[in-house]
Image: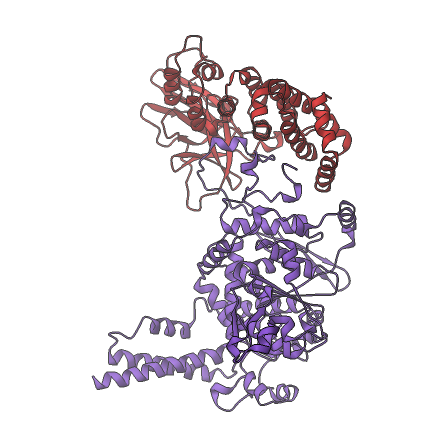
Amino acid sequence: MNAAFSRVLASARADFNRRFVEARHRYPELTPERFAAVLQGPGDAIVAAAEQAAPGSAGAVAQGVYDAALLLVGQRLAGPDARHPWIQAAWTDVLPRLGGLVAAAPERLIAALSNAAGQVAATPGASPERWIALMRDLGPSCGSVEDLLALGQLAAWRSGLSHYRAGALAAADRLPAAIALAVVDAPPGSDWPVVRTDLQRNVWHQPGGRHEPSRLRVAARVGAFRGFGGLFSQPPRIAVAQGHWLVLADGSAWHLIADAWGATLHRAEVPKDGPTPLPAYGALPDGLRLQGGVLRRGREELDLGELGALTSHAVSGDGATLAVTGDGTHAVVLIALN
Amino acid sequence: MAVFSLFQKVSQAPTNPQPAPPVRTFDVADLYRGPLADGPAAEDPAGAAPLDEKLRQAYFWIVNSAIISPHYDVEYNEGPSGDFTVGDTKSRLTLPSAQSYSSFVLLPLLTFATRRKCLFIGGPGRGKTASALLMGVLAGYPVREVRRAMQHGHPQMTIADLLGNPLPADLVGAQKMEDIRIAWRKWLGLRVKIIDEYNRIPTRTQSALLTVMGDGYAELLDHIFECPESAWYLTANDDQGGGTYQVIEALRDRIDVIVQALAFNPRFLGDLLARIEDDLRPEEVVPRAIVFTEAEIDRLQTEIRAVAFPTDVRRRIEFFASQFEFCELGGAQFEYKTKDTARLAGTDWAALSAQDNGRDRLKDLGCQTRNGLSVRNLMTLLIYAKAMAYFRGHRTVDLEDVRQVLPFVLHAKLQPDLEAPFFDAPGNASLRQDRIGWLRRLFDLACTEYDRLDLDRDDPAGALATEFRRGLEGVSEPEVRNRLARIERLISEWARGGKLYGHLYDDLLQLKYLHQRYTNYLRWLKTQ
C-alpha cells in the first residue's frame, strides 16, 4: 500500500474501524479479507494516482475510496467474489487513469463511475466491456469532471442503453468534438454537427458502418424466453401506447426502446383499456405488404418465416421501424424501414 | 469525520413503488444513480422528496435501523396472500402479498404527521419510551432536549412539576395575580410532547394535563401558556387501570390511538448483541434527511387533510358506527334508545342485556359492545385513515386503509361486552383478550353485512338523503308532499320488517330528520 494511503488510514484508525463495524452491522458478508483485497488493490491504485496528480489530495480520496469500498464489498458489488466484475473493472482500469479528476471530486467520481458501471452491467444486452474500454481510453482526455461525466453518458448509450439516447446526444454536445466522434466510431475527419444530425434523424444510423442504400432488414431481435434468461414465458405481442412501443406478454407490459446500439425493455403498467395489438396482417404503412410471412416493399422482400405465424405488428412513432411478433419466437423482431 | 454513515442511510425513493406508467421518460443523469450516493449533494436524498416519501423513508429507517424485530401486523395484500393454519387451535399465519407495516412504528409516525395523541402500552423494557424519543428527534429536537423534556409520571407529581412554578420573589412581592411571573416548564413549548407512565400521575395533576392535552394551554395562577400544536406520546405499562392511579376517563378519551409494544423475538438476539458491542444508539444517529421542520409538519397536515374520502368507503364507516349505540331497552322515547342513556342512568348492564331477547344476539354486532362511538372517535378514525392512505402514497382513502387503522383508533373506545354470545362462539375466545383482532373482525363482519344488504346499490334512506342534500331551492309543494309520502312509506315498510338493529335505528332517525325538514319547508311554502 502506498505511503500516502497508509498515512491517512493510520491517522484516523479509530474512526475507520468504527465505520467498518457499522458497515458490517448492516452487511454481514463484509469480511476483513474481502474488504482488504479491494482496499489494497484498486483502492490503493486510485489513491496513489490522485496523490501523484495532485499532491495532498490523498486524504479526501482515501475517505471516498474507503466508504465506497465498504458499501460495494458489503453488497458483493466489488471484491474477490463480486456478483459481476464490472464495478471492480471501473476501479481497476478507469479510476486510476483519472488521477487529477478523481483528486478534484473524489466522492462524486468514485460513486458516479461505480454506479454507472453497475447500471450498464445490469442492462440485458448492453456491453459493460465496451463502456469500460471507452472510459479507459477516452477518460484521460477529458479536461474536467463534467466532461468525464458527459463522456460516461455518451459511452453508456453507445454500449447499449438506448433509453438514454436523447440525453446522451445532448451530453455529447458538451464534449470536445474529437471525444464525441471517437465514442460513436465516426470515421476520421468527420464533422460532429453532421454526424449528430444523422444520428438524430435515423435511429439505425451507425457513423462507422457501411453506407448502404435504404433497404428492408432485420435490425434487432429483442427479448427471449424466460427459461433462457429472457423476460417472456410466452411469445409476446407488440402494441403502441402514446406513440411508443409496448410489449405485452403474460399479462405484463414493457416499454421497448431500440436503436442501432441496443434495445432495452422497461416494466410498464398494463393499460386497462388497450392498447390492443394490431393483427399481423392489418393495416401497414404505405408501400408495405405482408403476404404469407414475407414482407414486401416494391421489389424488396424480407422473409419472416422464422417468426412462425405472425401475431402482431406496430410501426414506431418516427416511421423508421416496423416491429413484428410471431407465435414461433419469444423475441420482437425490429425491421428497419430506411 | 466520516463522509457518510451507514446508520444515516435512508431507504431510496420510491419506498412504495407503484406500477410504472405505460410510457416513461428517461433521464441520462440517472446513469449515475446506484448504491453509492454521489457526493455531499446526495447525502440528503430525501431532501427534495415529497413529504409522503420522506415519511416512508422515516418509517423504513426506524424499522431497518432502529427497531430490531418489527412485527408486520398492518397487512396489505395485492392479490392472494399466503395463509397457513398452525397448531391445534388452527392459528392463522398470513404472509401479506403487498407492502405491510409494523403498527408500533407506523401509528406513532402517523400521529407525528397529524399531530394527534398516541399511547404506547406494553410491559416494561419493550421500547415504548425509546420509540417516543425517536419521534421527538424526527421533529428536529436534539436527543438530550427530548430526554429532558420528557415528563415521567410518578405518584408525587404535582401540578407545579408538570406546568411550572411562580417565581418566588414575585410570589412574595406581588400585589395582584398578574404581577406573578410563571416559570413555565420547557416541555410545554415543544412540538412533540412525551409523558412517560402517565397512569402513575395523581388524579389532580391528570386534570391539569387534560387541559394541556385537550385544549392546548396550561393555566397557573390565572396565567395562561398557549402550547403549540403538538404530537403527543404517552406510555403505560398497563392500560386497564393497573397504574398507580386510575386514569380519568376524559384523559383516556383524548388519546387518539393506542399501540401495543409486542414481545421481542429472541431470534433477533444476535442483533441486540451487536448493538451492545458496537455501542450504537439509534436515536443519536437519526439521519438529517428524515428530520421534519415545523413548516414541513404543517404541510403534512394540510396534505393529509386533502386526501379524498370516497363516498362508498365513508358509507361503510357509517354502517359500522351505526351498529353500536342503539339499545332497544335503553329508553322509551325513540331518540333515547341508546346505551348512553342506560349508562347515564347507572343501569346494570348485565340486567339490561339479559332483557334484550328479541334479536339474534350473535348476529347483532351491537350486542358485542357496551357503548357506542363518539364524534371524536369518528373524527379520529377519518383523519388516521387519510393519514394511512397518504403514507402509502395514495391521494384517496381505500377501504383497507380504514380497516387497518380502525382497531388502533377504537382500541380503548369501543368497550366489548365480554358476556356477549359472540365471545362464546367457537374460535372467538381469544378475541376477549385481543382487542385489535376483535375490532378488525367486527369491522369485517359489518362489511359482510353491508354487502349482504347490498347497500352500495340499494340504499333507499341514502337516496332520500342525497335528494335532500341537493337543496330545497325551487322544490314545489307537490314534490315536497311526494317526498314526505316516500319517507312515510319507507318507514312503514321497515316497521313491517320486525326486528330493529342499530343501522336501521340510525336510518329511521335520519328519515325523521328529513321528514321534519320537509315539513318545516312545506309550512313555509304555504305562507308564500
For the point 60% across and 60% down, the residue is B108
The image shows a total of numbered marks equal to 0
- Does residue B67 appear to the left or right of A309 in the view shown? right
Q: Residue furthest front?
A: B173
Tell me if residue B109 can be seen.
yes
Position of the N terminus of chain A, as image quadrant, is top right
Extreme residue toward the left, this view: B528
B128 displayed left or right of A105: right
Q: Which chain's colour is purple?
A: B
Query: Which of the image's four quarters has the C terminus of chain A?
Result: top left
Figure colour scheme: by chain
The x, y position of residue A61, in whole percent, is 63, 27
In which quadrant of the rendered view does residue B221 lie? bottom right
Question: Outermost residue toward the top?
Answer: A188
Q: Nearer the viewer, residue B491 or B119?
A: B119
Which one is in front, A42 or A270?
A42
* Residue B196 x, y percent position in the rendering: 67, 66
Q: Is residue B218 above or below residue A3?
A: below
Does any portion of residue B102 appear in the rendered image? no
**What is the x, y in percent for residue A116?**
56, 28
Is residue A164 toward the left or the right of residue B344 in the image? Answer: left
Q: Residue A185, percent across and down?
A: 47, 14
Q: Colour of chain A?
A: red
Q: Is residue A169 above or below residue B316?
A: above
- Horizontal side, residue A213 vs residue B330: left or right: left
